Amino acid sequence: MSDLEQALRAAVRGEVAFDVTSRALTTMDASNYRRVPLGVVAPRDADDVAAVLEVCRTRGVPVVPRGGGTSIAGQATGTGVVLDFTRHMNRLLSLDPGARTAVVQPGLVLDRLQEAAAPHGLRFGPDPSTHSRCTLGGMIGNNACGSHSVAWGTTADNVRELTVLTARGDRLRPGRDWAGAPEGLRALVEGDLARLRTGFPDLPRRISGYALDALLPERGADVARSFCGSEGTLGVLTEAVVRLVEAPRARALAVLGYADETAAAEAAAGLLPLGPLTVEGMAVDLVPSARELPRGAAWLFVETGGASPREARARADAVVRAADVVDALVVTDPAGQRALWRIREDASGTATRMPGGTSRTESGGSSEAWPGWEDCAVPPARLGAYLRDFRALLASHGLRGTPYGHFGDGCIHVRIDFDLLSGPGVARFRRFSEELAGLVVAHGGSLSGEHGDGQARAELLPRMYGEETVALFERAKGVWDPDDLLNPGMLVRPAPLDANLRFAVLPRGPVDVEFGYREDGGDFRAAVRRCVGVAKCRTAPAAGASVMCPSFRATGEEEHSTRGRARLLHEMLAGELVTDGWRSAEVRDALDLCLSCKGCRSDCPVGVDMATYKAEFLHHHYAGRRRPAAHYVMGWLPVWLRWAARTRTAPVVNGLAAVRPLAAVAKRLGGIAAEREMPRLARETFGGWWRRRGRAAPGGSGELVVLWPDTFTEHLSPSVGRAAVRVLEAAGLRVALPPTLRSGAVGDGATRSAAALLTARRGRVCCGLTYVSTGQLDRARAVMRRTLDLMAPVLETSAPVVVLEPSCAAALRTDLPELLHDDPRAAALAARVVTFAEVLERHAPDWTPPAVNRPVTGQTHCHQHAVLGDAADRRLRAAAGLTGEPAGGCCGLAGDFGFAAGHYEVSVACAEGRLLPAVREAPPEAVVLADGFSCRTQLEQLAGVRGRHLAEVLAEGLGEE
């Protein structure tokens, strides 16, 4: 490896990475398979690619081209050198609206091409569900399709010309009429014309094998089309000329409800003569909520286009009239259509976690389902019959799976609850695969209808094509790549479909962990297995309210994506590449830029919770060792702030912090970023104000609500607490604070009786957030247990617990019951937690908020987005006349993250992604909403803008007190 690395560094200008992290990040794609590469090269141009091929050929080292790494059949993994095209060769070189063509590099993400084409009324036709992160090179390698293939075909239908480097360094430009054909290819084809004319099934989604029939003279001897779908085994793509199509000016979406997916499948082919853009199918199993869908247990999503909204709607209405449905709905609103399409795009992840179980064990059931038979296709007219037979085959093997996908093309996606962890389970996986291959062929279908064969299906190609045609594939591979250098083991001479399974390297026994991982059966291995590699976390820029993954958007580095971190944790458990276990520096460094925003908890289709995994890792990593200074300073923030309050030294602390030399020394010693200004401590805490206000306060006469005095509201933003009290009481609610003595009572936030003082221990409630986020889980657990003791009287009432700081509310709802999973009081308190807007909506439903009547800007807190939800906030804002929506994303400060040394630049980059532009573009009269203390601090320090909690805005609207 040392010789290879040195030779590559001398030969290429791009990055050459043979370190553990780079290799670990590319061991897997979105398939069931895992291979450990020798190294990764990010070429800058075609000359770099040629140099890599030369160095590797002389040493007999395989080369594997890789784009977004979202392949589902294993073809983006390999044991040699991986070529990563996403770093440098990712540009749109030109776009010709007149000719409707674009010239692209292989690492260009599809959405970037769509964005460039859209102003010209154009688009690239194929659009896989991974369009926000898949690359054009990967699409060409797999002949990707997507939901619009009924209108615009596969990638191969939309490629004009390619620029390809062969393994021996020849630069070819494949096109029509034998253009760019390697020597010997034409003779091979012309020597077997009869087989090419009769041995290939005629169906719209035949992706399996090599498309040698595209080289027939009557089909234009199209070498470029034949190259598509070759999975990086014939040559390395360095450039492509692709066709663009005219995008409809208007679209409508007809959602058709059916009794089951078989009925939907049987109806799909009959809709094709109406010229739809898409005919997609999905069953109720994959829909988190069917409230907004028409009645039925399965649906067809049929999109129509037109020159005007009226024309698109008319075509959708025609589809509804022609369909024999249980119920139907036509959606013309673009936002409504996007919401429905997001359900479909997330299905591959949603299908990975099925209801009815937690995690696969060697002896138990499973909610985990896996690819492997993700995209086989049959003629559309046979889809209904095929699905019935497919269901019967599943049942005969005791397996479950929920089909969905491109019903109009006869292409079915399904994830099946294979047991890939035990020997008997893997054996059943093989038997089922062999029988299903026979079933697909019996229906005239293709083993792959979109994602390629890879390792998952290539072994079974003789069942589809016969041994002689597969032998012809091998000869074609030999013409293009006589040294078998490019992606060996794919398509021809494949590895067995049950070899190299990524789960085989994981430990057999459970891993000792701190959190409960209730949704994963208490198994940290199952939690790590959640990441299936669909890479939604690699989406950039952020869209809509999405939060995940701010650090990847800031750096563009795979190791700072949720998927990258999950891969490193997988390799940590495997112990082959990452050998230091919980002490791993590679995992620590990758997690260092995780903001613990929890965005992945909601935005990841399978609910990967990297914030929890990070806290777990930090706990073990630093067990018995000295921690970074910031962990002691920021992690123990509640202690230091309470100390300052008790000693009444807040003015002194503020004064010292204002002396720059002293502040610089303190920040350096405390591990705090030099660029940061320290927040000022309040002269009077919220609790002090509450006690001073005393029983003379007006109070409410309605329901009792307990207002949580979180650390930030108590010591840094007491104005938020005062405003919340005023609004809650104006709404007729009776506000109390939690007891401060363990034998205290609900009431005024303090118990002063002599008996109580003699028999009880004093304390303050705390959610433990700062300890959790720094991985100090033993301390967090102790703080949480003390809090539960203090909250015992509250739990004996029916009072809701109102938490103003979103991060604290999220910690109480999720971290508390996960960390104290053995204490039923934790779940009871978590169930009581409500946000400011929720308590008003549920417990003061007749109250009318003041009419503020102003536009809003700012940002929805990332923890609110991921854990709490903001539906009640949106309704409350609307009732108060606050118009517009805060931006999505993460502010970048994220508690202790943005204060820690080494994080400042990433923190600022996160803020510049959504928050700061939204504030700059807002009208002068806009209210800057920021319910989180971190968000308000970031706004103040980076933009000089004062953000306000919604409670403060409403309190101001109430007028003078």
Image: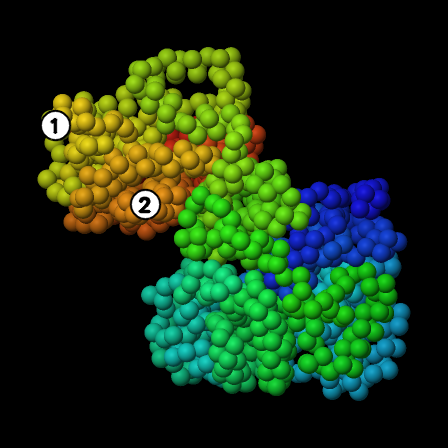
Q: In the rendering, at what x and y percent does residue 818 appear?
A: 39, 46
Q: Disc 1 or 2, which lies upstream in sequence?
A: 1
- On residue 823, which mark appears? 2
Q: Position of residue 811 (x, y in %)?
A: 37, 41
The residue where tag 1 is placed is 695
Residue 481, x across and y down, in percent: 83, 65
Query: For residue 295, what is the image quadrant?
Result: bottom left
Is 118 in front, or is 915? 915
In the structure shown, which secondary structural element does the residue marked by tag 2 occupy? Answer: loop
Q: Is residue 379 left or right of residue 213?
A: left
| Label 1 to label 2: alpha-carbon separation | 35 Å
Vertical comparison of 750 with 809: above or below = above
The residue type indicated by label 1 comes to Arg
Name the residue rendered at 81%, 55% in the picture: 61
> Which percent across, then down, holds residue 127?
58, 64
User: Given the image, on which type of amino acid does mark 2 rest?
Assistant: Asp
